[in-house]
Image (spheres, rainbow, N blue to C red):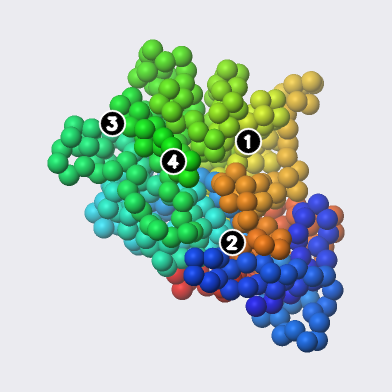
Amino acid sequence: MIVQGRLLIDPDHPPELGWIEISPAEGDAPAMIKKIAFGEIPDDLAPPTFGGRDRLICPAFADAHFHVPQIDSAGCDGMPLLEWLDTVIFPAEAWWGKGGAIPSTRTAARRLVNQGTSLVAAYLTAHAQAAQESASFLAASTPLRFIAGRVAMDRCAPESLTGEDIARVSGTPTPSPIMPNLSKSPRHRVSVNPRFAISCTPELLAECGWALRDRPEVIVQTHLAETLPECARVRELFPNTPHYTAVYDEAGLLKPGALLAHAIHLSDEELTIIRARESIAVHCPSANLFLEAGLFDLGRTADEFGVSVALGTDVAAGVEIAMPRVARAMIEVAKALRMTRTGAAAARIKVPTPVEAWDMITRRNANLLGAPTCCRLEVGAEADLLVLRAPEGWFDEHLVGRIIYNWSSDLIETRVMNGQLVEPSSI
Ligand code: GUN
Ligand code: ZN
C-alpha cells in the first residue's frame, strides 16, 4: 500500500510532499512503515492507494487514560468526583456485568477510531467475565492497540462491583482473578487496575502488588490525588500511612511505567517518590475541568520534579474523546493556571506549545505507554496513520496549532490502522 501526501513527520517542521510504503501485517507481526520518501512517487511504483498531493499525512493518536464502560456517561454534570462515581459511574459499570460489555466496547472502539486514536490505555470493569469479553472483542474486531485490565475494587461501591474481589479475599470457591487472562492478542498488553485507594482495602492493594511481582510486562493503572475530598477520605481510610502516594508505594504498585491518573494534589515528597519509582502522571485536563478537580501544574510535575507526564481523555469525566481536543484543553488549563499567578510565580507556570502538545498525543504518549514503535511516521514504525484534509491556508508555521484548535473528526479523510483502511462504522 502506498500513501501519498505532505508528511507530518516532525511537528516542528513544515510537512513536505512525499509517500509512505506500508508492508502488510503477517501473523502476529503488525503492518509496518517500510519506506518513507520525499517528492513524487516514482513511475514504476503503483499509484497511491490513499491520500493525494494536497493531503496531510500524520500519525494516529495515543490516549493514556480511558474507561471503556463509561463511553455513554459523558456530560452528567454538577457533581463532585465521589458523588458522580456513586450516582453516574457505578450504575453504568454495574450494567456491564449484566450483558452491557460488548455493545459499549463496540461504541467505544468506533468513537476512538473515528477520532484517529489507535493506541489506548483503558479500564474495563470489576467483572472478570465481562472484562474478558470486552478485551477479546477489542483484540478480534477492532484495529486498536490497547492496554486494558479488569478493575479491582472491594469497598465503598455497590456489591455488584465489589462482589468479585470480596469473594476472592474471603476465599469463596469461585474466585475471580485479579488479572484474568484477557486475550492473547499481540496488540493487547494486560494491566492491573486497582480503581483508587478509596475503593480498595489494604489487603486488595497488596494482592494487586503481589500479582505484579516479577511481571514487568504488566502495567499498573490507578487514580491518584484527583480531588481534595478524595485525598481527605484516603487519609481517613489509611491513618497510618504518611500520604496518598505511600498507600500505593507500600503495596508495591509504583512500578516503572505505572499510569497514575490525575496526580494533581501531591506534595513535593510524593512527586519525588513518583519520580524515583519511574511511574507516570497521566494528565487528564478535560476531565479535571469537568469535575472541577483542580488545575494540574505541568511545569512543577514534569520540569521541577522530573516526573514523566502522559495525556489522557479520561472518558467519561473527560468529555472529549478526541486527543487533539485534550491537547487543546491541556494548553488552556496551563494558561488558566498562569492567570491565577503574578510575577515570578506566573513565569514559572509552563504552558505547552501546540508542537509540544502534538508530540504528547502521538510519539510521547506512545513511548510512555511502552509502545515506542507507535504513533509516529518512521521507517519500522507500526502502520497507524491518518490522511487529513487540511485547508491550503493552514500550511504555515502554525499548522499544528491550527489542527489542534480547529479539530473535528471531519478533518480525517482516511484512517489506516495496522496497515488497513478502517471505517469506524464497520467495527
Ligand atoms: N477515581 C476512581 N474511579 C474513577 C473514575 O472512574 N473516573 C475518574 N475520573 N476518577 C476516578
Ligand atoms: Zn479515570
* Contact? badges 1 and 4 (CB < 8 Å): no
Which amino acid, by three-letter code, is at mark 3?
Arg
* Depicted 93 relative to depicted 412: above or below: above
Determine whether the residue tagged by mark 2 lies in a helix, strand or loop: loop
Q: How many labels does the image show?
A: 4
Residue linked to disc 2? 116
Which residue has dot 1 on it?
308
Question: In percent of the image, x 40 and y 26: which residue is there?
Answer: 251
Residue under label 4, please give it: 215
Labels 3 and 4: the sequence-earlier one: 3
Q: Which residue lies furthest to the front in this view?
A: 214
Between disc 2 and disc 1, the foreground one is 1
Asked whether the residues under the numbered discs 1 and 3 touch, taking CB atoms below 8 Å apart as contact, a structural biologist would say: no
Name the residue type under label 1. Answer: Ser
The x, y position of residue 107, in whole percent, is 42, 61
Q: How far apart are marks 2 and 3 (CA)?
A: 36 Å
Tell me whether circle 3 and circle 4 mark residues in contact (CB < 8 Å).
no
For the residues labelled 2 and 1, the Cα–Cα distance comes to 24 Å
Return the residue at label 3.
155
Q: Position of residue 326 (x, y in %)?
A: 61, 47
Q: Which of labels 3 and 4 is toward the front?
A: 4
Residue density around tag 2, few if under 14, some if 14–19, many if 20 or more, within 10 Å: many
Task: Name which residue type carries label 2.
Answer: Gly
Q: In which quarter of the image is residue 387?
A: bottom right
Q: Nearer the viewer, mark 4 or mark 2?
A: 4
Residue plotted at (63% across, 56% down): 373
Density class for disc 3 (Cα within 10 Å; few <14, some 14-19, many ≥20) is some
